[in-house]
Image: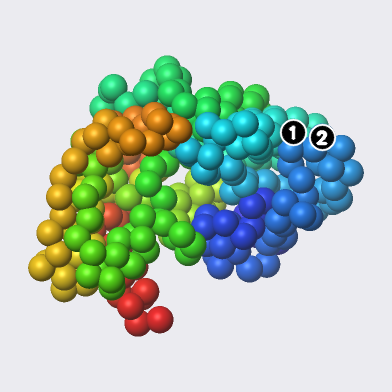
Amino acid sequence: MDPTTFLITGANGQLGTALRQRYPEARAVSSSELDISSRESVEAYDWTGITAILNAAAYTNVDGAETADGRRQAWLVNSLGVANLSLIARERDLTLVHISSEYVFDGTITPHTEDEPLSPLGVYAQTKAAGDIAASLAPKHYILRTSWVIGEGKNFVRIMMGLAEKNIAPTVVADQIGRLTFTTTLVDAIHHLLANQSKYGIYNVSNDGQPSSWADVTRAIFKELGRDDLAVTDTTTEAYFASKPEAAPRPLQSELDLSKIKATGLQLRDWRDDLAAYIKKETEA
């Protein structure tokens, strides 16, 4: 495995940033340098020396995807873009590593296994499901399905930390259940699969530990901050979004079955341990 032959797309996002930190010698590109949604751009790119595409590019604005402009952008990046990468991977015998989401399921089954039939709810979810299908057409592919991603950038943990700093006691949904996935965990999984030349296919990846609600995650955040004095009020997804008709539907069950990735020998850290380390780093920065 030679990281100098890796191409990281979506290099400026949360995962892209983590991948650049792990593989500083890899070639990393933003959308301005390689527009994956353009077949012409992908075909014209200089693929000399590349053996693997680590696709961290994605349109992730779940609610924005429900708008006219967002819908088009989501389909361009999450579906057509992946199809373009899948085709070039097939043509040039490259390994395609693609990041997916538990949103490809409707959240009525728990835990989600790799072979659960696709059942996306909103537009974002539908584009990610289509991207999965496209990525799977590359002969050498790893599709990593993940959930509740936390890294460098705007994310749930940082938002809740900001509320704590302002002494705001929030109301948070308590009927969506899952686990946080730190970008360090995702990068570890990608590295593990590539380094060990694991069998190609789909792998669920998140941190380990007891699945929890967003409300309980918020309580864990406040506890790490020493702000147990801030009460977290539980609510339902239906109630929270009642006044937001433009919001996308959310799957209630986001827990991923991690048996397959664990069977490859990868050890996954408890999300609470990584949360504590993340908050410690953030508060000391």
Q: Is residue 72 left or right of residue 16?
A: right
The residue carrying pointer 1 sits among few (fewer than 14), some (14 to 19) or many (20 or more) residues within 10 Å by Cα, namely many
Position of residue 165 measured from the top left corner of the image (x, y, whole percent):
28, 73
> In the rendering, which numbered label is found on residue 112?
none
What residue is at 29 percent from the left and 22 percent from the top? Answer: 108
The residue sitting at the bottom extreme is 284
The residue that mark 2 highlights is: 39
Query: CA separation, marks 1 and 2?
Result: 6 Å
Tell me which numbered mark, 1 or 2, is placed earlier along the sequence: 2
Q: Residue at x 48, y 38 (%)?
A: 63
- Point out the image quarter for the N terminus: bottom right
Q: Is residue 121 left or right of residue 180?
A: right
Local secondary structure at mark 1: helix
Residue picked out by circle 1: 84
> Which amino acid type corresponds to the residue marked 2 in the rendered image?
Arg
Q: Quadrant of residue 120?
A: top left
